[in-house]
Image: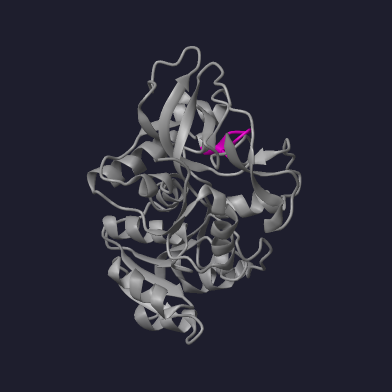
């Protein structure tokens, strides 16, 4: 079968589409015939290599997928062969204290499809049966294929970690990325007032059509002064940050006293200085967030289904053009999620 694999870490040229052996399911697993997969920044980090990470090469990239169950392993009652499902990419042991209390993303051995086991950029992939969920019927294959990772991440950030309430104010940096757009959609779903930033006027215009209440081109104006003006010096209740080092100082300057900053990514770097006086004097809550628990995923999927929320798909590529797809993601030109069409 065809799969997008790396034999070593490096730049885009290490990513190739090759023939590899078809997988077989073990106990509690299923084989999924992948119809569509979604790209994430995690795919870039895995391809380039992360300190301490050891992969068995060749390694298949990819975390998100929707497809049809082709085979089931021993002990699997659901899903059944022939059913169309999307997968929760989060992997856990199911036995540690965190898993037992329902916080699977805090598992001591937490992993993600495409990071700690072969991923979804392949014609077939083996996944735990428990990670399979029915595809929301209102979504196309491309929309369902890009949903899981960033939407459960945004859901946990806002609903579980930040405990966002109707009428609160939210600042989202770098609108156009998958997690930022998912956060915008969920924040509007619960009735929040949303501020978004970008260096692209086109992205800001498209964000307004999705419900953003206030937009700013950060190349033209200070984010801090803008928030001060728009909130009469109060600051926002919640800051959503998937950017990292470039926006960390802005987070602490834009959030209100007693507000919450929730961080899920570091696309601009992992090292940032903090003025600790701002933390204690303003009584801020700084919250880290990684993907989501099984309950987060079920709640997110239910919210998407009931409200017929549709992920923003930027562009669809065939599996054979995975390098072009990743190049688009890496340069930040996308607005929304990039999908890989694997099979009909």
Q: Does 58 sit left or right of 259 as displayed? A: right
Direction bottom: furthest residue: 220
**Which image quadrant is residue 297 in?**
top left
Q: Does 307 sit left or right of 1 as displayed? A: left
Q: Is residue 43 something that shows in the picture?
A: yes
Q: Is residue 234 something that shows in the picture?
A: no
Q: Does 178 sit left or right of 84 as displayed? A: right
- The residue located at (23%, 48%) in the rendering is 307
Quarter that holds the C terminus: top left
- The residue located at (31%, 72%) in the rendering is 208
Count the labels in the image.
0
| Residue 1 at x, y percent in the picture | 57, 34
**Which image quadrant is residue 85 in?**
top left
Q: Does 107 appear in magenta?
A: yes
| Residue 31 at x, y percent in the picture | 50, 26
Q: Is residue 135 above or below residue 81?
A: below
Q: Is residue 146 above or below residue 23?
A: below
Residue segment shown in magenta: 105-113
| Residue 100 at x, y percent in the picture | 50, 25
Q: How is the image coloured?
A: one colour
Direction top: furthest residue: 75
Q: Does 19 appear in magenta?
A: no
Between residues 82 and 204, which one lies in front from this camera angle? 82
Between residues 289 and 167, which one lies in front from this camera angle? 289
């Amino acid at each position: 079968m065809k799969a997008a694999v790396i034999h070593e870490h490096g730049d885009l040229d290490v990513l190739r589409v090759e023939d590899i052996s078809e997988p077989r399911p073990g106990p509690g697993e299923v084989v999924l015939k992948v119809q569509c997969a979604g790209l994430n920044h995690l795919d870039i980090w895995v391809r380039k290599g992360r300190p301490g990470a050891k992969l068995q090469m060749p390694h298949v990239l990819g975390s998100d997928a929707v497809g049809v169950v082709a085979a089931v392993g021993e002990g699997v009652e659901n899903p059944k062969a022939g059913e169309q499902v999307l997968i929760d990419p989060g992997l856990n042991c199911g036995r540690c204290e965190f898993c037992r209390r329902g916080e699977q993303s805090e598992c001591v051995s937490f992993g993600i499809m495409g990071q700690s086991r072969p991923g979804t950029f392949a014609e077939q992939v083996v996944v735990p049966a428990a990670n399979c969920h029915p595809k929301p019927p209102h979504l196309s294959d491309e929309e369902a294929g890009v949903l899981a990772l960033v939407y459960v991440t945004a859901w946990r950030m806002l609903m579980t970690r930040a405990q966002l309430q109707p009428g609160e104010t939210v600042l989202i940096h770098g609108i156009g990325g998958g997690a930022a757009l998912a956060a915008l959609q969920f924040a509007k779903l619960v009735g929040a007032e949303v501020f978004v930033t970008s260096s692209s006027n086109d992205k800001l215009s498209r964000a307004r059509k999705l419900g953003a209440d206030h937009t700013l081109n950060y190349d033209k104006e200070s984010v801090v002064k803008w928030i001060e003006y728009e909130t009469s010096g109060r600051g926002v209740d919640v800051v959503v940050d998937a950017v990292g080092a470039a926006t960390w100082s802005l987070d602490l300057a834009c959030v209100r006293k007693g507000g919450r900053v929730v961080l899920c990514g570091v696309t601009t770097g992992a090292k940032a200085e903090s003025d600790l006086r701002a933390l204690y004097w303003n009584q801020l809550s700084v919250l880290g967030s990684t993907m989501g628990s099984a309950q987060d995923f079920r709640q997110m999927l239910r919210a998407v289904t009931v409200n017929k929320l549709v992920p923003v798909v930027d562009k669809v590529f065939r599996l054979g053009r995975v390098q072009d797809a990743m190049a688009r993601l890496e340069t930040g030109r996308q607005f929304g999620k990039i999908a890989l069409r694997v099979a009909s």
